[in-house]
Image (cartoon, rainbow, N blue to C red):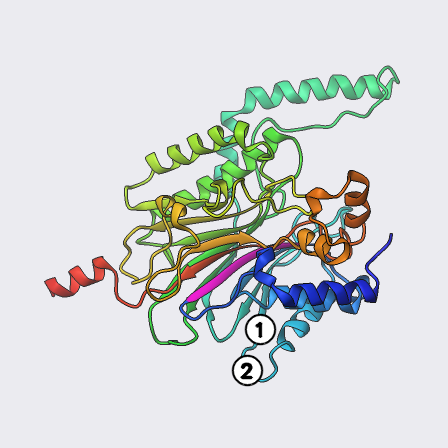
Amino acid sequence: MSEFTEEEWKLIFDEMETNPTAYGLPSRKEGSALIGSFNIRKLGAASKRSPSTWKFLGRVCHRFDLLAVQEALDNMEGLHRLLQEMNHIDQDDDDDWNILCSDKTGTYPGDNGVGERLVFFYRSSTVERGEVVSDITYDRSKVSEILFENLEEINNVKAKYDREMEEYETQTRKTKPTLTLPTFLSFIRSPYCASFKVKSASCPNGLSYEFMAINAHLMYGKSKDRWREFVALMNWIRDRVVQYDKTYYPNFILLGDLNLDYDNPAKDLAKMEQYMKNIQIDTPNEVQVNFPFLDIHPDQTEHFTSNIKLSQRYDQIGLFFRDEDGSGVGFPTHAENKNMGKVDDDGNGYDYGVFNFTELFAKALTNESYKDLSKEEQTKLVKKYEHEVSDHMPIWIRLKFSTSPSKKRKAEELVN
């Protein structure tokens, strides 16, 4: 496996420092917070990546206030090395970075298979961790309910599997059959949920965002199975947000590699839009759902992609919130996506994007856009970093801080 040479890394860092925002790496601004998600492929032993790779990853991750990372392995050396890189970038400031991570999920202890940790990195000057941290699961009563509702179909699938297994054992069938359940029962990896309060570094006692952040790495498999797991997670979040008077924080942000089968937006968008519409119908009017990356950004001509081959849209950020919750700071609604990237009177505004390091690498090393390279040249380039850096690129959303209380709070003050 070929990797970048030190000479190539120098060209990359030079290009990155010249104009990082040209490739979608967001700049830090007073009056806003950057929330991101990054699937860093098999983030495990520190020795598996070169010093220059750790330096690159550290510079990228340091841009954010809160970053959800997927595919961290049981070995936490890489997490600690990345944390070290992030803390050494601005040694003169008072920023410290912290890690909050799950235990390994996706495999039973001792069984074969690659389990993962789901991780949050958060900046101490702008982010406070709340008291609530938890996995997201369906409890036994809910699983039993699903089982009994789908028992006939499950029995039919099991009977077919038994017939095929008998054929395999008697050598009348060449391939060993797989048993795929016709319904959702549990997550392939339990999503990880933690409470955070994000505040302005320039005004730490001012208004802030308070929310539950969900870090998820959903299954990669058949389209139908992916969709079932996605819907199960969406239903869980929706039903929890509806209970906003009982939750620790009433607003939720979903971050992660959702493995949505969304590689053909023209075909798949209608299905997604209908599902989102039904989510809105099934919840109280004040509960909003917004997945910005399902829209085309106002400054773009097509949907963002988040894999390094620029062909898939697996990674997503979803906002679930009350439109007016009295907190003084509001998340952007779906209607506001058309204004993403536009600044307000304070020089700030909501925005979202992808750090397209594939384009950065192509420009730095070939002086050509990735899409202008031949298929052979693209493949040769990607092989240099698909394992060393990652096969996913980081996605992000910018949340602006309000300088005045919300309309609801103002109304309450007038009444009182």
Q: Nearer the viewer, residue 180 or 195?
A: 195
Q: Is residue 206 visible?
A: yes
Q: Secondary structure at mark 2?
A: loop
Tell which tag, 1 or 2, sits nearer the viewer: 2
Q: Above or below — where is 304 with respect to 20?
A: above
The residue that appears at 43% across and 49% down in the rendered structure is 319
232 displayed left or right of 376:
left
What is the x, y in percent for residue 177? 77, 25
Q: Secondary structure at mark 1?
A: strand
Magenta stretch, overall SS: strand
Q: Is residue 45 magenta?
A: no
Q: Is residue 76 visible?
A: no
What is the x, y in percent for residue 247? 37, 55
What is the x, y in percent for residue 42? 73, 54
Residue 217 has which mark?
none
- Which residue bears the numbered disc 2? 93
Around disc 2, counting alpha carbons within 10 Å, would you say few (fewer than 14), some (14 to 19), or many (20 or more)? few
**Distance from Cα at disc 1 to Cα at disc 2:** 12 Å
The residue that appears at 60% across and 32% down in the rendered structure is 225
Q: Amino acid at mark 1?
A: Trp
- Image quadrant of residue 274? top left
Q: Is residue 33 magenta?
A: yes
363 displayed left or right of 376:
left
Around disc 1, counting alpha carbons within 10 Å, would you say few (fewer than 14), some (14 to 19), or many (20 or more)? some
Instruction: Report how many numbered discs are placed on residues in the image.
Output: 2
Residue 97 has which mark?
1
Q: Amino acid at mark 2?
A: Asp
What is the x, y in percent for residue 135? 54, 53
Q: Residue furthest bottom?
A: 92
Q: Which residues are magenta?
A: 32-39
